[in-house]
Amino acid sequence: MASVLRTSRTKPVWSALARARFSSTAPKNTTLKERLAELIPLELENVKRVRAEHGKKAFGPVIVDQLYGGMRGLPALIWDGSVLDADEGIRFRGKTIPECQELLPKAPGGAEPLPEGLFWLLVTGEIPTQEQVTELSKDWAARSAIPEFVEEILDRCPPTLHPMSQFSLAVTALNHNSAFAKAYQDGVSKKEYWGPTFEDSMDLIAKLPNIAGRIYRNVFAAGKLPAIDPSKDYSHNLSTLLGFGDNAAFVELMRLYITIHSDHEGGNVSAHTGKLVGSALSDPFLAFAASLNGLAGPLHGLANQEVLIWLSKMQSQIGENASDEAVKEYVWATLKGGQVVPGYGHAVLRKTDPRYTAQREFALKHLPDDPLFKLVGQIYNVVPDILLEAGKAKNPWPNVDAHSGALLSHYGLTQMQFYTVLFGVSRAFGVTAQLIWDRALGAPLERPKSYSTAAIEKMFKDKS
Ligand code: CMX
């Protein structure tokens, strides 16, 4: 095998890393933090080697349109946790969604992967054991309480304040107890940054069910918030706090939902915002609150709310069980009104999003006759041709948000303004995994160069 690094004792230091990257299972009897501590020096060596071999090589041309065009396709970031292929969709540490569904540990009697395992995979590249996943569930349950003043902030929010704004406020306020912020003030060495970042990340993920549950109960008057049960997995507790813990199928949906929404490589708005803000050494709470503010935009995570609003308006205008012709007319009216069709298109993907497909398969198994699910399917048969005919969207196929609301609403979670909060809970898994590695690898402050239009004109005038 080419270029296996060796230590002075000729131990193949790359082998553990290669194993970690290409699949393997985690060594038993180790915690996530212990395993990270083993992997970090290997990855530091690996990055050093890659930079020594390739650091000064050009990485393709940049054209002016990319500067004006939202940096589409611009190679600018490093993130190993997940990679998005335009045709195939997302892979988490090299694994497709169906592979994650097959390989990651499940709850007793469950068929969907536990997000605890996905987090372990994102952080280490390894599939954890059932015991390691159970330990993570317990650890997160133990860390789940939120400070009283954060509860009060949420309780004082008017119910008219969007749940995503409340979510972001609460996460920002968690910075009060940040281990990283404290360690930095105490003069922690750069080499040790990842440790308190890891602790903050674990705390952040652990506290999200209490924050999401409290927002849901406050805004939608859904009764008193129950306690976290340390014997249950993360998704089960989240479901219980929302009031759906007794519904085994909903709990399974949450496991799948968190897994597939967790990460979508590094360049999407929420992942990149977290990385950007984290690069200033803002702690994980501040960085993730910024991610949430990006996720709350209608072209990104809020699209899951927008889809349901759009579907509801469609149903009230053309009725339930409408013909394909009536649906087509409604879609064209949306486009002619200068609006986007929510849940369709993507900045990178050029085929149906496998996160859509995973949700469709869940629906076929659990709710095949649900009217909204059928409408989502009918729209799938209608919208791509219309978007192609309209001729603007580069990708006419559905993304993750086209489907999620129909599943949630089937189980009675009908408050669409809450949907992006669930996306946010999930996205914390990817953003924090990335922050941990950025601190471990010493990722520098992000500072790309901006240009004025006059400067671009001058640059090319001078060259012509
Ligand atoms: N409906 C109508 N028009 C669309 C469209 C859609 N679903 N998707 C793209 N277009 C339009 C764009 O608005 C753009 O129009 P202008 O030239 O007038 O500006 C044109 O087609 C080209 O856009 P694109 O290159 O295909 O897409 P972008 O990379 O610019 O944008 C996205 C990607 C997702 C913002 C866009 O497809 C969109 O607005 N979709 C609807 C909102 C949505 O579902 N967002 C969720 C994405 C997934 C997520 O992040 O959660």
Image: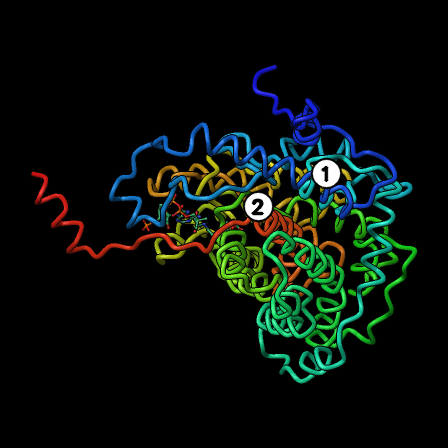
Q: Which residue is mark 2?
A: 441
Question: Which quadrant would the N terminus be assigned to in this image?
Answer: top right
Q: Which residue is mark 1?
A: 364
Residue 286, given in percent of the width and then of the height, sits at 58, 66
Q: Which image quarter: residue 121?
A: top right
Helix, strand, or loop for circle 2?
A: loop
Helix, strand, or loop for circle 1?
A: helix
At a point 67% along the width and 81% down the height, the residue shown is 153
Q: Which mark is residue 78?
A: none
At a point 86% along the width and 64% down the height, the residue shown is 228
Q: Is residue 291 visible?
A: yes
Mark nearer the N terminus (1 vs 2): 1
Q: 10 Å neighbourhood of mark 2: few (<14), some, or many (≥20)? A: many
- Considering only vertical position in the picture, is 376 above or below 196? above
Which residue type carries mark 1?
Answer: Leu
* 230 to the left or right of 97: right
* 210 to the left or right of 122: right
In three-dimensional space, the C-alpha distance between marks 1 and 2, rounded to whole angstroms, equals: 43 Å
- Considering only vertical position in the picture, is 119 above or below 304? above
Q: In front: 114, or 340?
A: 114
At a point 62% along the width and 51% down the height, the residue shown is 191
Q: In front: 70, or 379?
A: 70
Q: Which image quarter: residue 226?
A: bottom right
